[in-house]
Image: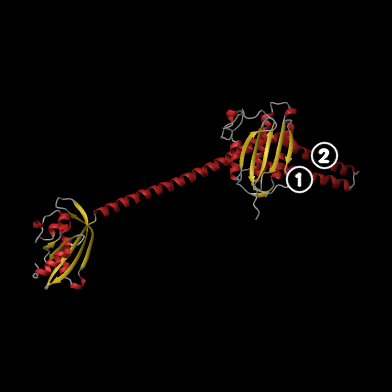
Amino acid sequence: MYKDKSEFSLLNKLIQSLPDAAIVTNKNGRIILFNALTEQLFGYPYSELIEKPIDTLLAQCSKEIHGKQIKNLTNRPVENTKSDMDGVPVLHKSGREFSADIRFNSFESDGAQFVILTIRDVTAYFQKMRALEQTNTQVEGKLQEIDKEKEYRAEIEKALKAQQTELAQMARADALGEIVTSISHEINQPLAAITNYARGCVNYIKSGSGDNEDIIKALEECCRQAEKAARIMTRIRNFVRKKDITLETTTLNTVIMDALTLIDFDLAAKGVGVELNLGSDLPDVSVDTLQIQQVLVNLIRNAVDAMLEKPKEGRKLEIYSKMLDSEEVECGVDDSGSGIKPDDGEKIFTPFFTTKENGMGVGLSISQSIMHAHSGTLNYKKGSHGGTLFYFRLPVQKAR
């Protein structure tokens, strides 16, 4: 115990004013003084703590550790007599365990060494930390799920894109199947011409009646007709082949005319009159020309099919292009068919929906996807010739 009562009284006032539980022990670890907060924290009355070993409070969970802590402190030099223990488990008198931060400080008075312990209940803090860790774990789990979901969506999008590419190729092949019969007449013309000119050359040479100039002219015509046939075959091959999107600078009118060369014999064979109203001086567009051709061929074929029930003199097809504003150009395919039934209007862009007996139902869906890929739009409305007007819009190429 303290020999100097006035100093002891001063120490008592000091620890009573502290915001945490405070205990003073002698060098042997016996309690000589503590404040009211200690009684509240541990649940022991004054009589059960005074002059009792500090193990009474701390040894239930870690007797060996706390005992060594005090012995080590009282055996150190005074200038090096501080130690901390954070988050250690201690017991209330009732047996309830809680977590505490403990601070040990050694001091000397009248030649004797003492230790003052301050103890703070940090149970709530650790509970919050555990809850935070649990939340972090849950958040990390959710983030991992999101990452997996993103990967899954990316795989689905990749698969859908591949499927769409396959469907586009199927649609091109389907269109080609109907075009080939009529386009064979077109390719037969240069082939027949080549045959005739070649036979003429052979006859000239055999008879010896022709001069070199006539033979050269005939051979030059053979070359021109062969080049024409090659161009036709190139258009067919490019139209049907599977390829990635390739943007190039062109005009909308050029794309329209190239698309018509693929189907103009079919139009003539089915008695469809075509009226072209193409705008002049249209700005350039940056598009995949084959894909836009595919859209046009599909719209024209649909228009022709819609007019087959009408007599030939009533089959009128208008194709136009125009500048909307400084941002977009528009192309329209306007037929004189019977129009779209109201019940079918909301479904015509739905994949695999078709009103044709042998239709695939992918043409309009793919055409709309192509337009979206080009930052454009595809729509329809009642036409000016009694049928339906399908029209698409494309952004013009920005000036660099």
Please state which amino acid type lies under the numbered disc 2: Asn
Task: Please state if 31 lies on the left or on the right of 179 as rendered.
Answer: left
Residue 93 to residue 74: above or below: above
Horizontal and vertical percent for residue 317?
Answer: 71, 34
Residue 362 to residue 41: above or below: above
Classify the position of the C terminus by image quarter: bottom right
Residue at point 80%, 41% (across, down): 194
Quarter residue 233 falls in = top right
Assess disc 2: are there few (<14), some (14-19) or many (≥20) residues with their C-alpha within 10 Å of its C-alpha.
some
Assess disc 1: are there few (<14), some (14-19) or many (≥20) residues with their C-alpha within 10 Å of its C-alpha.
few
Horizontal and vertical percent for residue 144?
Answer: 40, 49
Residue 398 to residue 22: above or below: above
Q: How is the image coloured?
A: secondary structure
Residue 298 seen in the figure: no
* Labels 2 and 1 touching (C-beta < 8 A): no
Please state which amino acid type lies under the numbered disc 1: Glu
Q: Which residue is mark 1?
A: 227
Horizontal and vertical percent for residue 316?
Answer: 72, 32
Classify the position of the N terminus by image quarter: bottom left
Q: Secondary structure at mark 1?
A: helix
Quarter residue 273 falls in = top right
Q: Which residue is mark 2?
A: 196
